[in-house]
Image: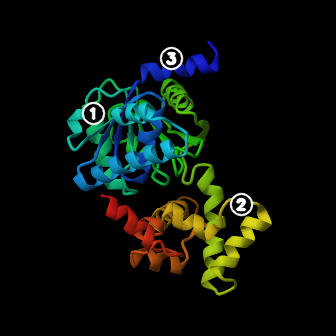
Amino acid sequence: MGEDNASQAVSAALSTVGIVGAGFMGSGIAQAAAAAGLSVRVYEPDGRALERSRRRLEESGEQAVRRGRANADDIDALLGAVRYTSNVEDLHDVEIAIEAAPEDLRIKQGIFRELDELLPHAAVIASNTSSVPIAELAAHTKRPDRVLGLHFFSPVPVMRLVEVVVGLDTSRDAVSAAEAFAHALGKTAIRTKDRAGFVVNMLLVPYLMAAVRMYEQGFASREDIDVGMQLGCGHPMGPLTLCDFIGLDVLQAVCESLVGEFNSPEYAAPPLLKRMVASGRLGRKSGGGFYEYAQELAAVGASL
């Protein structure tokens, strides 16, 4: 069986996807899965977060129609493929579940305990974590062989990479199913061991933290740091803009995980980043980080 046929077979077998968490990443994964023709259920106990996620999908569809990338029937099908719920029991028969909750170990462990009990027949229970060890999630289940990481990148509908994070007890069948699922979504999957940072963040975070330190020390302006890397290295956006895009709280969590695992100062979050997180300056999602996004945030709020 060829790669395309294999991925089609797996996507058919894993035709119902459950997503826990209706934040930016969970919403993006839901959109990508729905666009691939899968049935999607998004669980989120916060009703406002559910409504934001629903509206985000509608706006994305409206933009696609305006740009000529889709027609009204396509968008109706996309919207119809996603069901939003505040009742976790509605995930009871999904074939693959993806946790996309905040980067809080206790929250994620609780979700995995719940999903393990709720989904005895699911082929894969995955986490979209960028920093929590998969082993610390699998240990809270009775079936660690089906637990792995599916680390998508933001924005999910656009970014083509997925890191498949293989835990110590993850089975070959679960890995194969996860990779074929990623391929069915139009993504390229790369495989990584279960260690802090995986592949991408282990390489990316030292670069981003070096840019934060440079700005913190007054070595160059934020604009010149960003333009320097854009024009000097061909990067699509500068490091400080990218920090804002990722979320400074997410970066701090990844830094803490990397430092805890490798005890190397290059991974440590600079004091400035910590102070910004403590002050609620988290980047684009909060309206301000290294740059200001208040108008963007106000526009989103006005649409809800």
User: From the viewer's perspective, is residue 278 above or below residue 15?
Assistant: below
Label 2 or label 1, whichever lies nearer to me, is 2
- Where does the image place residue 283, in percent across and percent down from the top left? 48, 69
Circle 2 or circle 3, nearest the eye: 2
The answer to which of marks 3 and 1 sits earlier in the sequence is 3
Label 2 packing within 10 angstroms: few (<14), some (14-19), many (20+)? few
Q: Are marks 3 and 1 in contact (CB under 8 Å)?
A: no
> Real-space Cα distance between discs 2 and 3?
37 Å
- In the picture of the structure, the residue carrying the numbered disc 3 is 9
> Which residue, as the protein is rendered here, is positioned at the far top?
1
x and y, in percent, of residue 257 in the image: 50, 60
Eyeballing the image, is 79 above or below 249?
above
Local SS, label 2: loop
The amino acid type of the residue labelled 2 equals His
Which amino acid is tagged 3?
Ala
Task: Say which residue label 2 marks.
Answer: 235
Residue type, label 1 = Leu
Q: Is residue 61 left or right of residue 113?
A: right
Q: Which residue is mark 1?
A: 91
Residue 21 visible in the displayed image:
no
Judge by depth and name the residue closer to the eye, 198 or 65.
Answer: 65
Per the image, label 1 sits on a secondary structure element best described as helix
Relative horizontal placement of residue 251, taking residue 228 as reference (left or right):
left
Viewer can see residue 1: yes
User: Residue reaching furthest right?
Assistant: 232
Say which residue appears at 54% left-offset and 58% top-offset.
261
Q: Residue at x 65, y 72 (%)?
A: 210
**Residue at 62%, 12% in the rendered image:** 1
Q: CA distance from mark 3 to mark 1?
A: 22 Å
State the SS at label 3.
Answer: helix
Question: Marks 1 and 2: in contact by CB < 8 Å?
Answer: no
